[in-house]
Image: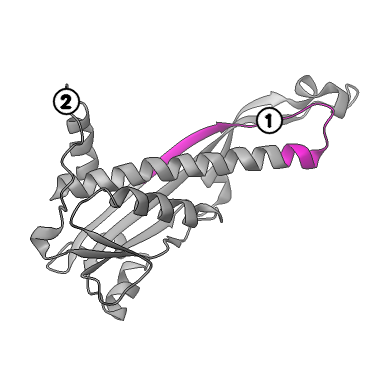
Amino acid sequence: MRWLIILLMLAGCSGYRFSQQENPLSQYGIQSLSVPMFYNYSNISEASGEFTRETYRLLTGFSGLKLYNGYKSSSDAILIGIIKSPEKMYDSLRPNNLRVAQDKAPNSIGTTRENFYIPGTTDVQLYLQVIVIKKPSEEELSLLKSGIGDQVRTNSKIIFNEVIPLKMQYTREILDNQGTQVNATQNFGAQRKTIRTMAEQAAVTVRDMIFYAF
């Protein structure tokens, strides 16, 4: 969290631009970095690929840092990404702004039924834990991926271990004269687009946090 505060302060400085992109990990002897597929411990199944791809893409902006897409044992360090969410699906995808369904789709639902409500928006809540560790052992990987992994302090091998909270909202659709399958498909598409945007924003935060941290 401390790096998030620093990042916001720097981003708010007048005239500030992210321009220097030399490898910030070189002072730790890290010239190559493996970026395997992020672990998805959340209850949103499609998150892993988006977050891995966007983070890898932005880290290519550091000159002098060789990236491996996937785990390579010969790399100097590995970046571990762990996507988490609240335990209950309701807290991960929280419905908001309830509206009367009959008002939005009178032809599909009819006007004689008792009123029932549908959400107008959905809040998506995720967390991304990012770890940079040099030559990890199986025991170290197991510890970092465990429920207490975010409490492990940095040391000579664990260069970076931070958790980024992520929250975004999308608008749900209800299309009159369309079947429930069409509406479900539309809303699933909106959710996937939101996850993609969250992944893009998280990748920017990861890149900037690593840059400012070192």
Left-right relation of 70 to 135: right
Q: Which of marks 1 and 2 is nearer the N terminus?
A: 2
- Is residue 1 among what the camera can see? no
Q: In which quarter of the image is the N terminus?
A: top left
Q: Where is residue 161 in the image (x, y as percent from the top left)?
A: 24, 58
Residue 36 position in % (x across, y down): 38, 65
Q: Mark 1 points at which residue?
A: 173
Q: Which of 15 and 13 is in front in this view?
A: 15
Q: Give left or right: position of 98 versus 159.
A: right
Where residue 21 sits: x, y (%)?
Answer: 18, 45
Rendering quarter of residue 132: bottom left
- Residue at image mark 2: 13
- Side of 73 where 121 appears, left or right: right
Question: Which amino acid type corresponds to the residue marked 2 in the rendered image?
Answer: Cys
User: Does residue 93 appear to the left or right of 14 in the view shown?
Assistant: right
Residue 92 versus residue 17: which sits nearer the camera?
A: 17
Estimate the x, y position of residue 53 in percent, counting from the top left.
42, 53
Residue at (18%, 37%) from the top-left corner? Answer: 19
Residue visible at 58% across and 41% down? 191
Residue type at numbered disc 1: Glu
The image's colouring method is one colour
Secondary structure under the numbered disc 2 in the rendered image: loop
Judge by depth and name the residue closer to the eye, 56 or 202: 56
Looking at the rendering, the stretch of residues picked out in magenta corresponds to: 165-184
